Amino acid sequence: MHLSTPVWRNTLIRDQKNVIFMTHAIVLGSLTAATIVGGLIESRQHRQRLARIPKRIHVNGTRGKSSVARLIAAGLRSAMTTCCKTTGTLPRMIMPDGREYPVFRPAKANVIEQLRIVKTAVACQSEALVVECMALRPRLQWLCEDKLIQATHGVITNCRADHLDVMGPGEEDVAWALAGMIPVGQKLFTAERRHLAILQKACDDRGTELIPVGLEEVEAITTEDLEPFPYLEHAENVALALRICADLGVERQAALTGMWSAIPDPGAMTAHHMDFFGRRINFVNGFAANDPESTERIWNMAIERYPNVHKKIAIFNCRADRADRSRQLAEVINDWQPADHYLLTGTGTWLFARYAVKAGLDPMKLIYAEGQGADQIFETCVANAGDSSLIMGMANIGGPGLDIVRYFSNRSKFEAFK
């Protein structure tokens, strides 16, 4: 029988396929084993790095977590080598000397980047590391704490109705979701008051001490304490940060002095004034407030600050991927102190308009600016501003929000919002 016959040829082909299959199986198995071993080694090295940072503060919450993280780090820097990482308006790594660097992301945000943050803090020989929790999904919040940070001090600023599509459907569900990052056997500090019972249950389950910052401590923050901040800082945030600094042995005045000199988050509430060809324009950056409670609060503060303007314009920067947030705000704005115009920008503005009109808002007050750049939005605002105006941005700092802030601020005089 010749080798070229069909029987021999089929046998050779079958043997070649078996060899290829076995080779692929061996390679795949080797890669899998190498990945597992590499992961175990990386996990062990990460735990060793964490052990070299004796004080680890993990900050979470609905509102103000970026500000609180910055305040804590600034207060601690007066007494110990401290690194800080925030993921607020822009992801930032804050070094022990207060300098900031952007956090490089080759793709979308990923909680695994916290490994690099810990490495950097160890390289800086940090005694303390303050990290803002960057996860929204409850399981990832637990992962960030239990595997990546293992905090000695947990912080939950507050529990409000936001990101309900991920942590909802209700405010209590948000509280339970945030409780996922409570450290085991350590301390949890919070300025939350409505859902303390939920946080207490989670702390009891994990053997953690709950330390609430109550109304008395907030009211003890004086005007003299807040005046030196070049932007609007909330007394609750300062009280919470001071309580943590005190627990870590930092004297109150030293901590406050450090906080006053800290660089604010780009989304911090600031005011800008300009005289534009005889028109007095007052722009307030309130984009970082996204839940209805916080947004209405700063809207009222802005109106109180500029009571005699002829026109009030509310800029709502919508995001199609934050549809739940748009709906929440739209359903309540008709109950707020009224604006003369509501300018809608960003993406998914039709959803906001639909719910706002359904809730009773006059549709003639709506100005549609979806897809427009900051320069066009500025011109639209000026055209509707009258002789004097209050223009306030709200809902989302992402998308065109930060560009709008920069456009107004580059053409105006900065005013500390007090």
Image (tube, grey):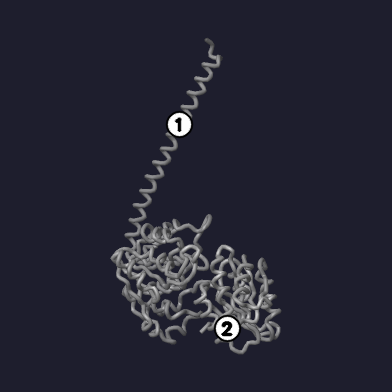
Tell how many labels.
Answer: 2
Q: Amino acid at mark 2?
A: Gln
Q: Nearer the viewer, residue 378 or 210?
A: 210
* SS at circle 2: loop
Give the mark nearest the N terminus, 1 or 2: 1
User: Which numbered circle lies on residue 23?
Assistant: 1
Task: Name the residue at 57% across, 77% down.
Answer: 333
390 w.r.t. 102: above or below: below
Which residue is denoted by mark 2 in the rendering?
Answer: 337
Q: Nearer the viewer, residue 311 or 227?
A: 311
- The percent position of residue 219, horizontal first and vertical second, equals 40, 85
Left or right placement of residue 409 versus residue 25 in this view: right
- The percent position of residue 286, horizontal first and vertical second, equals 55, 76
Task: Name the residue at 45% across, 83% down.
Answer: 226
Q: Amino acid at mark 1?
A: Thr
Left or right placement of residue 392 versus residue 165 in this view: right
